[in-house]
Image (cartoon, coloured by chain):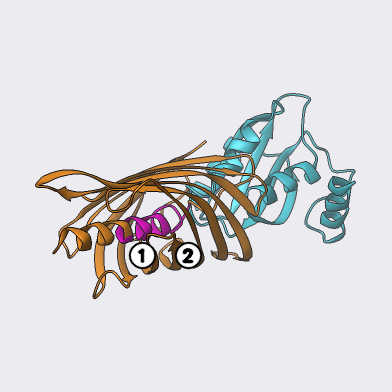
Chain colours: A orange, B cyan
Amino acid sequence: MTLARRRTAAIAFAAGVAAAAPGAHAGLFIGKDLWMVMAYGTSDMRMAEAMYGITPRLSAGVGWTELRGTHAGRLGRVTDIGYLQANLLLHRIHAPDSVANVYAFGGAGASRGNFFGGTEATWHGGLQADWESRRWYVNGNVHWWRSDAFSYRIDSLTLGWAPYAADYEDWAAWLLLKGERRDPLMSGTEVTPALRLFRKAWWFEIGRSNRGSWMFNVMHVF
Amino acid sequence: MFKRSIAAALVALGVVSPVWADPTKTARIGVDGMVCAFCAQGIEKKLKARAEVERIFVSLENRIVAVGFRSGRGLSDAELGRMIVDSGYKVTEIARVDASVDQIRASVQRR
């Protein structure tokens, strides 16, 4: 892979993670007056976000992503994006044993990178729909990123299954399978099996994709 | 005005008890959509932030939140309902019971 393709692929990957990691589950489900902070990392990137629940339907916050890759034979930063983001719950269906949500999210920020000069204004936005019970989980997400230097669309689908129905004070364990496509920068679909564990206000995920990239994710609400 | 409208609507829908319900008695709240402990943290955080609240028990299996109060203190059904709704959930009923939170916990865990 050429350096330019590495860089663009890294940016696309980060955009995909930004769409999927914080938004895939609890990141958008923030109660009023609560904070959610998260950190996400793979061999290609580092990411941190903080979101605050303004109303039961609206949350907003800040995010920062550093993309890493090999440049001139050395592993280092490729680009980073700082952004503001708002998340709006469009619709929620409460059933006794499940919940379904449709969200819109978006925001603006600035990008710096090794393959373009200066700082680029960047905006992003997308839609997410999810449904979950105590044993099953499905999430679909589409996310667009735009600047004068890059333009990407990332689609992801995540399926989850819990081997047991954890209660409120238990450790919950989930097995996940996530597929992701990053148009037009990556051919095919990256598939990441992962393990999700959470208890009370702490959330952990670890996985390894079919492309050999390790993934971790930590979230906390307070 | 908005808060009073929410309270009136909850009473009219039969979700909460009328105004004569004793706000100092243990509240046993039925909640729909509570499937994930991480997502439900907001309920506990909101309730614990209130000085009136002494003990809380959340059961995803039984779809209930039980709230016990300090002696002589309490919260109205409308306030409790609003806190659950602000946390992103749907209240199906609020019952005032004589049992303590620990007794409710023990009874549902025996099932």
Residue kind at label 2, given as amino acid type = Glu
Pick whichever of labels 1 and 2 is earlier in the sequence.
Answer: 2
Seen from the viewer's position, the closer of residues A143 and A174 is A143
Query: Outermost residue, left direction?
Result: A73
Residue at mark 1 to residue at mark 2: CA–CA distance:
9 Å
Drawn side of residue A17 relative to residue B8, left or right:
left
Name the residue that disc number 2 marks: A132
Circle 1 SS class:
strand
Image mark count: 2
The relative height of residue A218 versus residue A207 in the rendered view (above or below) is: above
Instruction: Report in which chain the residue with disc 2 lies.
Output: A
How crowded pointer 2 is (Cα within 10 Å; few <14, some 14-19, many 20+) is rated as many
Q: Residue at x 17, y 58 (%)?
A: A3
Residue kind at label 1, given as amino acid type = Gly
Residue A64 - label: none
Drawn side of residue B58 relative to residue A191, left or right:
right
Magenta span contains residue A138: no
Query: In x, y percent, where is residue B50?
Result: 69, 30
Same chain for the residues under marks 1 and 2 in the image: yes
Name the residue that disc number 1 marks: A160
Seen from the viewer's position, the closer of residues A145 and B110 is A145
Classify residue A16 by image quadrant.
bottom left
Q: Which residues are magenta?
A: A12-26
Query: In x, y percent, where is residue A110?
Result: 45, 48
Query: In x, y percent, where is residue A161?
Result: 35, 65
Callouts 1 and 2 close, C-beta under 8 Å: yes
